[in-house]
Structure formats: structure tokens, C-alpha cells
Amino acid sequence: MIYLDNSATTYPKPQSVVQAMGQAVVRYGANPGRGGFAMSVLTGQAVYQCRRDVAALFGAPGPECVVFGANCTGALNLVIKGTLSAGDHVVVSDLEHNAVMRPLEALKSKGVAYSVAKVVPGDNDATLDAFRQAMNPKTKLLVCTQASNVFGVRVPVERLAALCHQYDAKICVDAAQSAGVVPINITESGIDYLCCAGHKGLYGPMGVGILVLRNPGDKLGTLIEGGTGTQSKSLLQPDDPPERYEAGTINVPGIIGLWAGVRFVSGKGPENIYREEMGKAAYLHRALSGIKKVRLYTSEPKAPWYVPVVSFNVGDIPSEEVGARLAGRGIAVRCGLHCAPCAHQKFGTEENGTVRASVSVFTRRQELDALAMAVSKM
């Protein structure tokens, strides 16, 4: 199989991740923080070391700033629902995934309002102006993707963070498509809440998400309460992170696998990964641009304006049919609306969706040649 659906989840995983997952079941089989015996202590130490390495990768003040959950969607919901109340206003981009839009729609009935700001690809000044115009005195939170999961367009979240703080608002960044791919330092950039998918650019397994806090003293409302292994005499949820947001048993095998993925990314360096993957995406874009009836929706992906994602359509063939034909040739891509109708409305593709090809560090150029050849035969 030629796998080009890395924006959904990276595949294959590094061998170190595969080995770590197997080791987790054997070596780290006890519940961390719930016992004083050797295996429980060892497991707790491993989880702590993963927090430490995640914090280092993203420039967070310390391990206590790293909160584990089920996925990036869960992290986004925690920030959105743990921050907002009746009368609050939110600003989002016009590229957002449903992981942002659906929670905000759910909060409208509770008196939370939101405005949509236009992202102008290749013009960060215009994008910043659009967000500035969307903000008002009631704006409490800005939530936006760092990069579109459909079209790869990057959003200048560092500049938006500075804008937010001028309005005494917070910024929450959906880094599902950028974490592990582009360098991120939340201390330097001013990002208050960074939400990450462990199974994409961080090369961990599915079932692990991360919320990274720039200020561990920020107190979000909780979505669930329960046992944490700490302060067990109290019937109140602990105040301090990460325990405040991690009620119940955490996904230890997933976290151990994620730890190996984070070390893999740190070893290669996100800046090197970005340069390598952008070269592959640009190569594919050029190959597809030479095929009659192929429609591409962005210019050739180049740094720093894009992440390595290419969306296209083939004549009048529905995107799902293109995907099915490619699957018949052993090529895996993602078709349709990609859970991001806002982005498709922006680019005029909401009726048919698009065919999306996304690369990883393991993608070979001959695989991209095979995709282009298969498309040309349609």
C-alpha cells in the first residue's frame, strides 16, 4: 500500500514506537500513581518522563504543563468549555475543523457568541487585520488552527497571540496538523493553550491527545471529575495540573508509545522534518499541476505559508470516486469534506470535497510518482 493519508494519522510508525507499545504492556503494566510497589512507581516515572519531553519539545515551563487525554478534540473541548460562559465572545478562523466549530455551536445555546475571521493565504498582515476587526470587548478566547487540515494553509498564530494579549484574551491553537511538523515554542510565541494529536506528526498511536499549558496557574473548568491518585480524602477535584484534568486511569500504553514518537521527532528535529516534507509536497504539487483536468486549490506549498498537504480534484469525477479508484490501485488518500466544512466553503469545494494527499517522513518520491501516474490515467 502507498499510504498518503498522514494528515489523518501517520503510517507507518517508527519501529521504536512499535517496540515501546509492546514493552508498555509488559514493563509498565501497573497503574501510575496508584501504588507504592515497584512497577507502579516505574510506570509513573515513565509517564512523567514523557511529560518532560513533550514540555521540552514545545517550550513549556515544565512537565506539569502537559495534560494527556484521548485526542486533540478532547483537548480543544476542555479549553473551550472550560474557559467560556454566558456573555463571552470567541474569534475563530474560516479554516476550522469541526473539533472547534461543533463545541462552539453547542455553546451558543448557553449564551456564548463567536465571530469568524478570514485567513488570507500568503498575507499575514491582512489575516491579522481580519482577526483584529473580529474582536470586541467581550472577546475572551481566540481559537484557531495553526494549519488547515484540508489545504495546508498556515495561520500566523504567533502574531495572533500577541494580538489576543492586547485585548486581555487567551489564544488556543489547534496544532493537530502542525505539532511535530513545524517548530513550536509556546513560551516564546505566547500561545496559551496548545492542543495536539499524538498520532499524527508526533508519530504516536491513536488514542492519545495532549494539551500543553503555557501557564499552569490558569485554571480551566473541568469536563470530568474523579480519581487522580492524589488528595483522595477530598471530594473536590484537585486544583493543580495535570491531575486536575486527568480524572481516571490514563492511557499508559498510548503514552509510552507517544513518548517514543516524541523522541523520534526530537531526534530528527521539527525544522528538518518540515523542510523534508515540504519538499515532497511541492514535488507532488508540480507533478499534479502538469496533468490535464486536475484542479489544485492552492499555489505550490512553500515555507512558511503551508504545511505538507495537497488537495485536488480530477475533472468532474466526485472526490470519493477518485479515492475509490486510487484505493483499487493500492493508494490510500482521504476524500470528501475532511470534517472541515468551513474550509471547503472558503475554497468553494463544499459540494464535492477534495482528494487530499499528505506525506510523512517515510513517504518516498516514487510513491508520489505512482499517485500522479494513477491520476493521469483517469
Image (cartoon, rainbow, N blue to C red):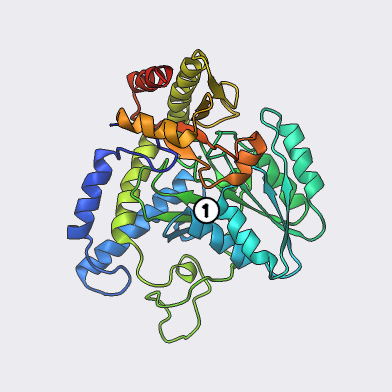
- Picture layout, residue 179 above or below residue 152: below
Q: Quadrant of residue 351?
A: top right
- Picture layout, residue 20 above or below residue 274: below
- Picture layout, residue 86 above or below residue 357: below
Give the camera-side residue of 121 and 30: 121
- Residue farthest left in this picture: 26
- Residue 196, position as x, y percentages in the image: 48, 49
Tell me what residue is drawn at x 48 percent, y 73 percent: 224
- Using the rendered image of the protein, determine whether residue 26 is visible from the camera's viewpoint: yes
Amino acid type of the residue tagged 1 in the rendering? Pro
Q: Viewed as shown, does residue 128 lie left or right of 187? A: right
Residue annotated with mark 1: 61
Q: Quadrant of residue 233?
A: bottom left
Mark 1 lies on a secondary structure that is loop
How crowded is the residue under tag 1: few (<14 C-alpha within 10 Å), some, or many (20+)?
some
- Residue 36, position as x, y percentages in the image: 26, 74
Q: Viewed as shown, does residue 96 lie left or right of 329? A: right
Q: Quadrant of the N terminus?
A: top left
Tell me what residue is drawn at x 24 percent, y 68 percent: 30
